Image (cartoon, helix red, strand yellow):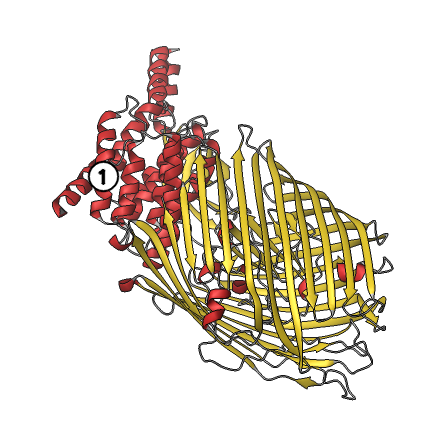
Amino acid sequence: MKTIVLFTALLASQLLMANDYEETMKLNIVKLEKSTSIEEMNQIAALFMRIADVEKMEWLPSYYASYAYARTTHFMNDADSIDSALDHAQAILDDLLKQKSDESEVYVLQGFIYSLRITSAMRGYKYSTLSNQSLEKAEQLNADNPRVYYCKANNIFHTPKMFGGGSDNALPLYKKAKALFEKNKSANTLFPGWGSYHNEVMLQKCLAKK
Amino acid sequence: MKIHTISFLFILILTGQWIDGQTIVKGKVLSNTGELLVGVNISIVGTYNGTITDTNGEFELEVENVTGKELNASFIGYKTQTINLSDNTDPLLIKLNESVTGLNAVTITAGSFAADDKERASVLEPLDIYTTAGSLGDINGALKTLPGTQSSSDDGRLLVRGGAASETSVYVDGLLAAKPYYSKVPDLPTRGRFSPSLFSGTVFSTGGYSAEYGQALSSVLVLESNDIEVEELTGVSLMSVGADLSKTWCAPNRSTSLGLGYMNLAPYYNLVNNRLDWTKPSESEQMNFIHRKKFNNGGLLKIFSTAEYGERAFNTEWDAEQVKISNNNTNAYLNVNYSLPIGEKSMLKSGVATTLNNDRQLAWIHRTRENEVNIEGRLTFVSQLSDGIKLKTGFSDAFTNYEHHYNQLQSEINWEGKYDDHILGFFAEPEIKLNSRFAIRPGLRFEYSTYLNKQNLSPRFAAAYRTGKNTQLSVAYGQYFQSPVADYLKFGSDFNNEKATHYIMSLQTGSLKERLLRLEAYYKDYDHLVTYSKGTHPYNNSFSSNGFGYAKGIDLFYRDRKTFSGTDYWVSYSYIDTKRLFLDYPVEATPDFIANHTISAVAKYFIGAIHTQVGAAWTTASGRPYHQPGDADFMTRKADIYNNLNLNLSYLTHIANHYTIIHFSISNVLGSEQLVGYQTIKNYDGKPDSLVPLLPDVKQFLFLGIFISIK
């Protein structure tokens, strides 16, 4: 009796405690993509940080932690909150850039974070330049990364037409991103996969403007 | 046995510690200053289990088998704290200390102005260097709108806190740039040799700088050249004064850029009224080559080089006499440096910078030819000993080979001189962050000059204390030594190193994003300045190192990007009181390049609807002293107030799908008389010295440029 109780208790605790890396990551990546609450996204970001703390050899937990903080800014309005969230995202990314300096996705995320810093026209030149530089670096590292073109297209889309921006100039890049999104359906489900849905939305928007 | 087991289980169930296994750990997280911290990551070490603190700084967490487990509280900018858990269920009170490496940690700023995206102590952004009205693409033009500098539109070089132009040294990627300006000819200002577009970071120190730098009495300007470029780019610039062409090639982990430039002021001078009678308006050809490569071992190689040839000739009036001035200059600069990370925490930087310079100049009856070779080799080791302690040590050898030929027209006077000098330098300087609020930087530098056979030891010290979130106090002290300039050393080695001692106190509050205020007070003591008494011609003066002097003043800088939407402006005010006994001054006096009060204001406004940035820069300075030959007392007269307003317009557009900036600027919009002061011309033939007013060549300068980037 004692043995059985002990055994079951041990087993249950083992199961509960099991740091099932893949499962937890998968679950929370999906949760993050669906979330519209800043509160929840901050919780998820913190969880990714905790995972990163345990799984020291993995780069994806810190990547998603940084991405989650960056994503919260989609639901913010004032520049100060956006800056503070991006400071968090950047601090995590700074370490990641050292740890994984040959990964295209890390530079895409850097480009993404820079473009989110553009909260006023005065910041446009500085941060679009920095963003595009990071995306160029990402393209050098992996020319088949669809997010490179999706982010580039976004930068162009939001740049005034006078400076070579606008929907017509962004369209070919959204198309290229779409083709690559379809081609690159990654086998590794933990690998960054964001952007395809919004890419399609933007692509249709550009086509509608024609 | 059976009863034992049952009672055992019973106890376990009752205490809820094992089978159920859950304990609720509660707590609150504050900063060491008592602020509530929201969003702190609470985790059980070794597990994914955790939560974050809510808006009251509080958390609640279910933990299995709590005894013996550790709880981490971590937050960006703070040191992670670990707590051993026990089955005691009292709420925890956790206080986090700010991290010394965090975003808000103190940084030593006394005396220095940074324009860098990476430097947190920045007061400028790299882009500000281009977009400051009146700077005309000259780094120094933008820096002259900062406090501590003289407006000195007659000189063009940086004159900092009472120091002469030669007292500022320029470093590129940590290596000396011996000739950072184009050759200075009498009666005309010069400008910086290096285009601002080649640099991504600028730190301009107006005093109290680190032991890393020697051979600068007043100031150092540290330029960090661009990193590996990732965008293939062709740049075409068409300007009213010339054209530039540049091309950048990129590959993973390396990039190469080549630039060619041609400048000619003749077409422009044909259209305007010049004060000077130009026989050969300035014409120059330039080239620059930049290469960067990152190696698999993490090492980074940077090669930065420029070369140019320029000539010009004009006639001017000295004492109602027509005087011919001409200058031909050939210059090459090659800076090669390699930095290699050693382990995670250390970096070895090595480099060699070579400057070759040849000047042929005629000024009235004085014909000179100068040849100069400067080679500086440097080895620096930077090591992060712990989170809070960074140690820099380094060794350098700066070699100079200088040769000077002089002959006086229509006379028998000839002179030739040359010298070789090695200045060996060694420094060690730890930067110690005692905590997130308090940092000190004690340093020591040793230098030995083989030519002067003199050595000196300069102690340096800087400290900063952060009193609030965005407010900090800094102090700096240092002894600075510099060999006399080649103009004196060519006559012999019987000199001392000139010496300045700096004392600086500084207060900075606010942030660059919104409003920033910097207030600095300083006192400087000079010793061993070169003095001379006039001989029978310019090449037989007699020299000594007996000069001395002082400078004290207040510098104020205020930048505001918040108050007026879309407008970014800054205001600088400098007050200086300085006297020196140097050159051939008979008594201690304020030098003729000093204005006691200088005010600069720079404003930028972006008009989104027409994609145009409008900029204005206004400078006014109190009159500079001068000496009227024949006066009984020395340097007692003062020139009028100097006043200059510059405007610029940058229109951003596209030409055939290529990003294009059309830039227009105009100096002295108000068309005021721009007398900066008077210059004394020495006469050696028994006649009294003559006094020449310092006036710009053209009253208003207009500039139009089209800059196209082809991707």
Judge by depth and name the residue closer to the eye, B42 or A130: A130
| In this view, B6 is above or below B76 | above
Judge by depth and name the residue closer to the eye, A204 or A70: A204
- Residue at 44% of width from left, 36% of height from top? B250
Judge by depth and name the residue closer to the eye, B293 or B326: B326
Please tell me how crowded label 1 is: few (under 14), some (14-19), or many (20+) other residues with Cα within 10 Å: some
User: In the figure, is residue B234 to the left or right of B418?
Assistant: left
Can residue A171 be seen from the camera position used here? yes
Where residue B619 sits: x, y (%)? 52, 74
Q: Quadrant of the N terminus of chain A?
A: top left
User: In the figure, is residue B673 to the left or right of B563?
Assistant: right
| In this view, B385 is above or below B14 | below
| In this view, A128 is above or below B621 | above
- Mark 1 — on which chain does it sit? A
> For residue B45, what is the image quadrant?
top left
Judge by depth and name the residue closer to the eye, B34 or B705: B705
Where residue B584 sits: x, y (%)? 80, 74
Residue bearing mark 1: A172
Looking at this view, name the residue that lies furthest to the front: B410
Where residue B622 sits: x, y (%)? 59, 80
Q: Amino acid at mark 1?
A: Pro
